[in-house]
Amino acid sequence: MTIPAERLYTHLCWHGTAAGTDLFDLHVAASILAMAAQDAEASGRTLSEACGLGSAELRDLFLLMFPGAAGMLGGLAAAAVVPAADERQLREILFVNSAHASPFERLLAHMIARRSLSPDHLWQDLGFGSRRVLSKLMRRHYPRLAERNAQEMKWKKFFYRMMCAATDYALCVAPVCSECDEFDACFGAEDGPSRLARIGAGPLPLPGEIRA
């Protein structure tokens, strides 16, 4: 790394803002990469392994979102990304349900699928300040999934439910969620601090754009 993980978010946001990148999408991409970089440093993995994007995909993301920072990619150790079957399936579910099938939504699907393998709430593993940011992301980029999750099931639980449905496998045996003993595990509060405390909701202009 040429830039410490805790400074990566600010560095990327500065370059993205200068390029006129959409503020919310900029916050999303920079948060995920900063969180992945922090995990990569802690575990001895590469950024590619932590975020789910190979070298070419990382370059595509940088050129799309923060082109002025593309020069730093030479200092980010990359590796081939070989997703397991479950991860590939989640990538497909996300992209098939994307709003515009855009290059950014494809790259975002790959990052979400890889970060979903981490142990905390998904919004924490993506480096966000709260679930609200993740909910806005889903409404903007994967609206059909957001509509199907109108009851606010925890997103990792919801994703695995979708994956099971795609393979005709029953994730649980309760006739309805309200009668299930594990209701809180699927629908309970997702409280907790941001894993990137210095990021919080994102020190970008117009913070209402991010938290809405």
Image (tube, rainbow, N blue to C red):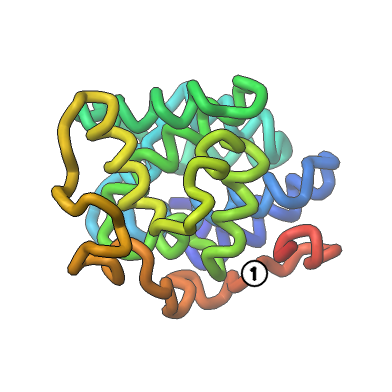
For residue 54, say whether it is visible: no
Q: Which residue is mark 1?
A: 201
Tell which of 60 and 90 is nearer to you: 90
State the image coordinates of residue 179 (x, y, percent, origin top left): 25, 63
Relative to 75, 160 lies left or right: left
Position of residue 197 relative to residue 28, above or below, is below
Vertical side of 93 occupied by 205: above or below: below
Residue drawn where x is 46% and y is 60% of the image: 123
Q: Secondary structure at mark 1?
A: loop
- Amino acid type shown at disc 1: Ala
Q: Where residue 17 sits: x, y (%)?
A: 80, 49
**Residue 173 vs residue 28, the one in the foreground:** 173
Please tell me whether residue 198 is drawn above or below residue 106 in the rendered image.
Answer: below
**Residue 97 placement (x, y as % from top left):** 52, 27
Residue at screen point 29% across, 53% down: 176
Dot 1 surroundings within 10 Å: few (below 14), some, or many (20 or more)?
many
Going 40% across and 52% down the picture, which residue do you hit?
A: 155
Give 27 or 17, whichever is nearer the viewer: 27
Q: Is residue 70 left or right of residue 126?
A: right
Tell me if residue 12 can be seen: yes
Image position of 62 with respect to 180: above or below: above
Residue 11 position, x and y percent, is 65, 56
The residue nearer to you, when weighing 81 against 156, is 156
The answer to which image quadrant residue 113 occupies is top left
